[in-house]
């Protein structure tokens, strides 16, 4: 299944959603001559033709444009600007194809007043392939590199949703570069691939131990899902991607290692995903749909796609977020421009190819989704800032289309299991469960897990559970106590990439702020909770070895209220013995979490609570009662240590320990020995130590 607009783009240059203007929109196409500076040569200009029956659709056949087989071309559309600013409206401007597959930010044209640098749109890039006299337009990079998936992974072999452990990685955090004495993240798709593929050399940070030949850091860690912060093209250079500009194109900088002569993001992203799949890792994409930065449609059809200032249009259906329709709940563009999703118009539908009533913004996002699903074979989506998207009907349409496209991908292979191997989750930190009960989304970021477990990790109850430490832990460990009905609905994390604000800092920094000195113990306890809780665990890159924040903003201000982290993952900190111990411990538990059936079901109950004499000890069981696959976690959130803990007879007695099925034995699985057999006379009676958890399982 493809979108009608994408099918048209195979043989024509197509501009969607422009009305009648004089002069008509035109195509400016040519090639780039290398040099300093780059020059645009062999320029041709062609007027676009209105497609019969579609007054808002314009195109010109590629066959009419004098293109050569195998050559790469750069092009703009020149349009009459449609913008509320009367100084801009009606003027002509070159803009990027709003559905470009590749752009070249090296060649942004200068503009005259009243336009400014935000109006300097890069050219789109396409490759021509001629067969039987017909010119085809092929998605390609600047050197003509195309998307390729050389390996065919059996989709049924990828992990199911209830088996996942997700690694969240801002791509530009994957390596560091000294700029003005500061560490700056400048990673690329291939740098990330080198964290997975043993024989792939990292383009820019081969000096790091984690990417030495023969090593595969992420597979050795054990994770089975990788989520990149937005990989779609952004005007922001070497940042996180939360200002998406060109929704159908992978990011220009993320395809440009320092020694490359040109960017190859289409090829490199496909290579990364292919490597993920061959290593049993699912690939998730973070998508920003609420707003866009410097989007071409700001010039092409501004009011149909964007609401520029909700505070000046409070009665507009697109003005408010999803939490309430009052002045305190206006949508926030965070310096970008908010998409409209409520405004409906009659026009060409780029998905069906028919004239019908549509939301242009919704259909643009669905078109981009179709491109990412079909061309890049993604396995899941994280939708950013759901409250600012506002429209839940659209969220459901988007989720349903993504799942339909995934089912078709499985059907092509004749594979089963499509439903449980795809996931669409949203970030809405108030966690409205109606998004789940109404089937708008598959899951939510479970911010409350982080908030609750952090309090437990410093021996405190959460403010919402007055003087009730036990309930703080119970609710953290079992997401169903927050109203979730299944573990696949809740994404759990100790730290997220949104590190600014009270108690949101990196976990290491949080411990430092709260006077914790035994960080190794606390990190191991934290990850035991994360990886044995009901939900899908997600690890922010670097947390697995207690990475810390040193730099918060581009000016070097280290201030928890001062903005998002910009320093990269400091893999060099793995040289600290205690941090390596943490990472090895986390790796053992990840591998256990992804392979042991009891942690893939919801069944959880608390066997034992001991709050006597300043103790804070809780014991929980995961797995079905009376089954031969059960996990018991004994967690001590206090300074208590069993008396004479090292002596042979020392014990701490746990009430209600599950019976041992015939032929089975209890093993401790969390310590250095992969599996330590527990003497049958000591089951449920082993000594405990301060701020430590032990994980036991039946084998």
Image (cartoon, rainbow, N blue to C red):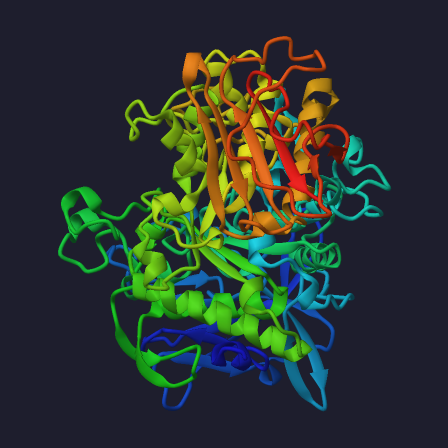
Residue 442 against residue 664 in the figure, above or below: below
Tally of numbered discs = 0
Residue 628 in view in this figure: yes
Rendering coords of residue 594 (x, y %): 65, 48
Q: Is residue 252 above or below residue 182?
A: below
State left or right for residue 588 relative to residue 214: left
Is residue 356 found left or right of 643 in the rendered image?
Answer: left
Q: Depth check: 93 or 425 in front?
A: 425
Where residue 236 sits: x, y (%)? 50, 44
From what the image shows, is residue 44 above or below residue 33?
below
In the displayed structure, would residue 544 be above or below residue 379?
above
Residue 255, given in percent of the width and then of the height, sits at 66, 51
For the point 42% across and 20% down, the residue is 611
Identity of the residue drawn at 43% across and 79% down: 58
Say left or right for 249 vs 219.
left
Q: Between residues 450 and 397, which one lies in front from this camera angle?
A: 450
The residue at 65%/79% (across/down) is 412
For image coordinates 39% across by 70% down, the residue present is 363
The quadrant in which the N terminus is found is: bottom right
Give residue 426's position: percent from left, percent from top. 42, 52
| Image quadrant in which you'd find residue 641 | top right
Left/right placement of residue 74 relative to residue 665 reads left
For this rendering, which residue is in front, 21 or 451?
451
Residue 80 can be seen in this image: no
């Amino acid at each position: 299944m493809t979108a009608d607009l994408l099918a048209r783009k195979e043989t024509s240059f197509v501009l969607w959603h422009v009305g009648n203007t004089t002069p008509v929109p035109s195509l400016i196409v040519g090639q780039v001559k290398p040099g300093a500076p780059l020059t645009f040569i062999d320029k041709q200009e062609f007027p676009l033709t209105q497609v019969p029956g579609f007054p808002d659709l314009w195109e010109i056949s590629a066959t009419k444009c004098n293109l050569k087989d195998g050559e790469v071309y750069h092009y703009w559309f020149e349009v009459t600007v449609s913008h509320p600013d009367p100084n801009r409206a009606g003027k002509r401007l070159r803009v990027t194809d709003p559905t470009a597959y590749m752009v070249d930010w090296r060649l942004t044209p200068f503009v005259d007043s009243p336009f400014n640098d935000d109006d300097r749109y890069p050219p789109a890039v396409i490759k021509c392939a001629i067969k039987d006299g017909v010119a085809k337009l092929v998605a390609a990079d600047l050197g003509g590199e195309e998307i390729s998936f050389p390996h065919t992974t059996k989709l049924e072999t990828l992990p199911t949703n209830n088996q996942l452990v997700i690694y969240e990685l801002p791509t530009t955090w994957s390596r560091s570069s000294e700029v003005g004495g500061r560490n700056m993240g400048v990673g690329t798709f291939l740098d990330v691939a080198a964290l997975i593929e043993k024989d792939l050399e990292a383009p820019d940070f081969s000096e790091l131990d984690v990417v030495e030949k023969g090593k595969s850091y992420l597979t050795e860690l054990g994770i089975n899902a990788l989520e990149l912060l937005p990989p779609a093209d952004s005007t922001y250079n070497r940042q996180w991607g939360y200002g998406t500009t060109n929704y159908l194109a992978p990011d220009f900088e993320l395809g440009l290692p320092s020694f490359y002569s040109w960017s190859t993001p289409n090829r490199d992203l496909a290579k990364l995903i292919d490597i993920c799949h061959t290593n049993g890792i699912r690939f998730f994409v973070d998508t920003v749909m609420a707003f866009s930065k410097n989007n071409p449609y700001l010039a092409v059809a501004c009011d149909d796609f964007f609401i520029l200032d909700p505070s000046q249009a409070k009665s507009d259906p697109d003005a408010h977020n999803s939490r309430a329709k009052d002045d305190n709940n206006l949508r926030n563009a965070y310096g970008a421009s908010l998409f409209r999703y409520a405004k409906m118009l009659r026009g060409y539908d780029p998905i069906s190819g028919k004239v019908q009533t549509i939301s242009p913004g919704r259909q643009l996002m669905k078109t981009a989704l179709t491109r990412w699903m079909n061309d890049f074979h993604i396995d899941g989506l994280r939708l950013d800032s759901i409250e600012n998207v506002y429209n839940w009907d659209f969220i459901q349409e988007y989720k349903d289309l993504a799942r339909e496209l995934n089912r078709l991908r499985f059907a092509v292979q004749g594979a089963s299991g499509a439903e449980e191997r795809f996931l669409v989750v949203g970030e809405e930190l108030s966690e409205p469960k109606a998004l789940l009960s109404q089937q708008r989304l598959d899951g939510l970021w479970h911010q409350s897990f982080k908030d609750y477990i952090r309090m437990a990790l410093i021996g405190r109850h959460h403010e919402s559970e007055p003087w009730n430490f036990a309930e703080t832990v119970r609710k953290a460990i079992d997401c169903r106590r927050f109203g979730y009905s299944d573990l696949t609905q809740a994404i759990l994390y100790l730290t997220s990439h949104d590190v600014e604000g009270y108690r949101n800092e990196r976990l290491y920094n949080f411990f430092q702020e709260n006077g914790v000195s035994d960080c190794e113990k606390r990190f191991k306890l934290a990850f035991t909770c994360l990886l044995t809780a009901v939900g899908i665990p997600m690890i922010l890159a670097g947390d697995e070895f207690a990475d810390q924040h040193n730099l918060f903003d581009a000016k070097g201000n280290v201030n928890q209220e001062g903005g998002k982290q910009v320093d990269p993952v400091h893999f060099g900190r793995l040289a600290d013995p205690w941090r390596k111990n943490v990472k090895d411990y986390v790796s053992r538990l990840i591998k256990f979490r992804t392979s042991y059936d009891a942690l893939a079901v919801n069944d959880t109950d608390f066997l034992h609570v001991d709050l006597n004499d300043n103790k804070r000890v809780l014991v929980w069981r995961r797995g079905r009662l009376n089954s031969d696959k059960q996990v018991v976690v004994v967690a001590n959130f206090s300074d208590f240590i069993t008396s004479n803990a090292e002596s042979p007879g020392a014990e701490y007695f746990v009430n209600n320990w599950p019976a041992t099925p015939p032929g089975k034995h209890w093993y401790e699985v969390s310590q250095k020995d992969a599996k330590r057999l527990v003497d049958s006379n000591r089951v449920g009676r082993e000594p405990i130590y301060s701020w430590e958890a032990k994980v036991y399982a039946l084998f």
